Amino acid sequence: MLKKLLSYVGRYKKEAILAPVTILGEVAMEVLIPYVMASIIDKGIRAGDIKHVAVMGALMVLMALFSLFFGAVAGRFSAVAAVGFAKNLRGELFKKVQSFSFANVDKFSTASLTTRLTTDVSNIQMAFMMFIRTAVRAPMMMIFALIMAVTTNAKLSLVFLCAIPVLGAAVGLIMTKAHPRFKAMLTLYDGMNARVQENLVGIRTVKAFVREDYEKKKFTESTEKVREAQVRAEKLVILTMPFMQFCMYASIIAILFFGGHMIAGGGNMLTGDLTQFITYVGQILMSLMMLSFMFMMFVISRASLQRVYEVLTEESDIVSPENSVTEVEDGSVSFKNVSFSYFKDMNNLSLEKINLDIKSGETIGIIGGTGSSKTTLVQLIPRLYDVTDGEVLVGGRNVREYDLETLRNQVAMVLQKNVLFSGTIKENLKWGNADASDEEIIEACRHACAHDFVMSFPDGYDQDLGQGGVNVSGGQKQRLCIARALLKKPKILIFDDSTSAVDTATDASIRKAFRENLSDVTTFIIAQRISSVQDADRIIVMDGGKITDMGTHEELLEKSNIYREVYDSQQKGGDE
């Protein structure tokens, strides 16, 4: 896992290597400064040699400046490497998510993927920056200071050598217990992000139903759960600091006691030696603290590492095959004994035994109650999902044989949920065809009955839509989405209840434009209104994931009870 994640350091390897190298210079200076300081005390001040004090003092100042320089350079290198690593990792994660099928996204959930791309990557970035600085600094500082301390007084070194295993055991125990708690905390973060995302997307519904207080309460509950989980996880970590400080100060007190006796008793220890020794002890124990914090950060980020790794190693269940077909011959579509389950379970089917042959250029209406799997049926055509059983053919070839980009470029969908993006109307329309000319854009908008209202805006096609198209109505948004699909000039066009927000007159105008200009395009129209599909070449009636009837409007009025009931209820509603 670490090997794969570290591969995303990429072109920031130089900074990632130079950071620990320059830290070595900083460590060397910090370890030598106490030695120079002891020399000033014992050979300068004690002996009254002012020249020695001045020379060694100047040397100590110079070493401190070098230490400062190396530390600053190392800080810059580590920051650049960590930020670059996070940028590469986040970019790779986003790229991976873009390759996911709907099933892959459903597996993780949108909120969880958002958390992994933001909070988890930030945790990893902080851990990486600490690692490239502390992983070299702390061990080298501890080793060098230990050598110097033992060299100064081997007997006195036994004091802190007893403290090291105690500290190590305590830190190891805390880390073992902390990891599952941080993992649980991040799962609750997913839930909180889901609440935020759901609320912001549906803010108009919230306000329409005056549910602000209810949503505030739900969000407060989510944040409270996150807070409790965070406190539960971090209260273990914060025990480390007081425990380590206790060990550190206890060691210093013991050293002062025994070292003071050695000096007072006329032993082989001088005042400068004791000062130097205490400084080294502080460096050793500080190094242990830094190591423990590095391990703590690793514990905190370990859950994030695993969550990010899960996304990076997730394989999309829908990919282009080797030697894939790169041309769609025509817009014919065939369903051969197709069954489908979102759960890959033949006992829980959304579609069952669908057999259907559609000629290129036909217009097919699809009608049925909520939950009859109308949308599921058409999503199998561009291979947004793979069939569980049977096969779907487009242009006479199994959709699994096609290059995904080729297939999806020839199938344009206007989904149930109309999505526009931040930017101008023209920029949104060019999602259908990035190279579309102004004339082609205007023509598509005329077919979708969108040109007139677009030109009513102050900036026309350069009008900014705001985030998610907040500056246009539901019907206008639908018509812009239809125009965007038309710009693809596909062989197959799918409208998933995409005129539900427009009036019947506009709906009729759109259908008339389609009949006149899209006669060679295979068109699927999913609708709730009979009037939207009654002119289709054939109409499919679905119920419970099965095709119950199929025929023209007149044929279905005679033979289909479901179709006739829907028609009569709508006619009655229209008369009233």
Image (cartoon, rainbow, N blue to C red):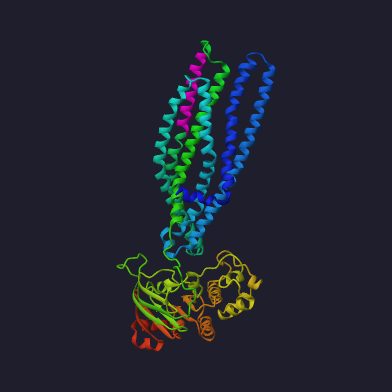
Is residue 252 on the magenta stretch? yes
Vertical placement of residue 512 versus 29, above or below? below
Q: How many marks?
A: 0
Vertical placement of residue 335 versus 104, above or below? below
Question: Is residue 414 in sight in this rendering?
Answer: no
Residue 418 drawn at (x, y percent): 51, 70
The reply, left or right, for residue 494 in relation to residue 272 is: left
Q: Quadrant of residue 273?
A: top right
Q: Residue furthest left?
A: 347
Is residue 385 on the magenta stretch? no
Question: Is residue 49 in sight in this rendering?
Answer: yes
Residue beneath the point at 36% across and 82% down: 565
* Quarter of the image where the C terminus is located: bottom left
Residue beneath the point at 42% across and 77% down: 397
Q: Residue furthest top?
A: 266
Vertical placement of residue 570 versus 206, above or below? below
Q: 86 or 571, which lies in front?
A: 86
Residue beneath the point at 55% across and 68% down: 420
The magenta segment is 241-262
Residue 370 drawn at (x, y percent): 39, 73
Most frequent secondary structure within the magenta stretch: helix
